[in-house]
Image (spheres, grey):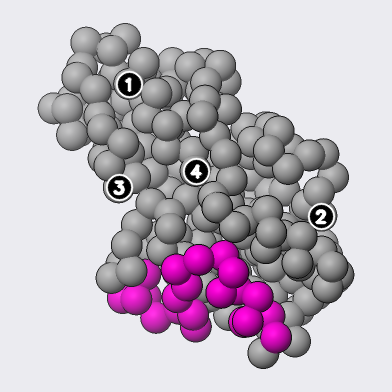
Amino acid sequence: MYKCCIFDLDGTLLNTVYALTRTMNLTLARFGLDAVSEEETKRFVGDGYKNFVNRAFCARGQENPQVWEEAYPVYNRFFQANCLYRVDAYDGIRELLAFLKEREIWLAVVSNKGQDRAVENIETVFGSGYFDLILGEREGIPRKPDPAGPLYAAKTLGVLPAECLYLGDTNTDMRTGSAAGMDTVGVTWGFRGRSELAAYRPRYIVDAPAEIKAIMGN
């Protein structure tokens, strides 16, 4: 029986593609580069903001690492102002979380989004204290796909990795959950497709949050 659900943030709990795309396009414009689309954003994100910047700039022909370094603080300033732009929970997520709370399941978030912005996103949408732990990118804990984040969450909440269900929408998440020794769920409503998730052989793949309720009964 699972005692804890650990969720990725972007593309799993919250649809943040509009905020991410807006922030990146403001950054690109500052450097005289063309905008990226929302579909491109979905492919570029998932491995921390620096990789997002690198990939977007490369896609627009700017492959100079020195320019990327100059862009990082610009991106962060724009993101601080725009990180909540059109952000909302995916359909069915609130109902799923309510179901898990009724069953006294620990709720955690492990994200490669910076700690402050991760907390701001989650608490703005779901309220302060709704999740038992929110872990964003921070010093001392390597970002995903390193399993340190989920393992830290499990230890903090007093559960074993085998008692955790790890849920995410990208190959990074599938690798993270597997490396942490947790049953892993690929969700198809986020930023990537079923084929990418299936290639990393998660325990489950689901098309809607309601399907997770049946998994919790296993």
Q: Amino acid at mark 1?
A: Asn
Element assignment for label 3: helix
Magenta extent: 197-217
Element assignment for label 2: loop
Lower position in the chain sequence, tag 3 or tag 1: 1
Lower position in the chain sequence, tag 2 or tag 3: 3
Q: Kindly identify which residue carries mark 2.
A: 132
Element assignment for label 4: strand
Residue 15 marker: 4
Residue 43 marker: 3
For this view, does 35 lie left or right of residue 131? left
- Work out whether residue 177 or residue 14 is closer to the camera in this orientation and state it: 14
Density class for disc 2 (Cα within 10 Å; few <14, some 14-19, many ≥20) is some
Residue 25 marker: 1
In the depicted structure, whether residue 218 falls above or below residue 19 = below
Q: Amino acid at mark 3?
A: Arg
Instruction: Tell me the CA gap for discs 3 and 4.
Output: 14 Å
Instruction: Tell me the CA gap for discs 3 and 1.
Output: 15 Å
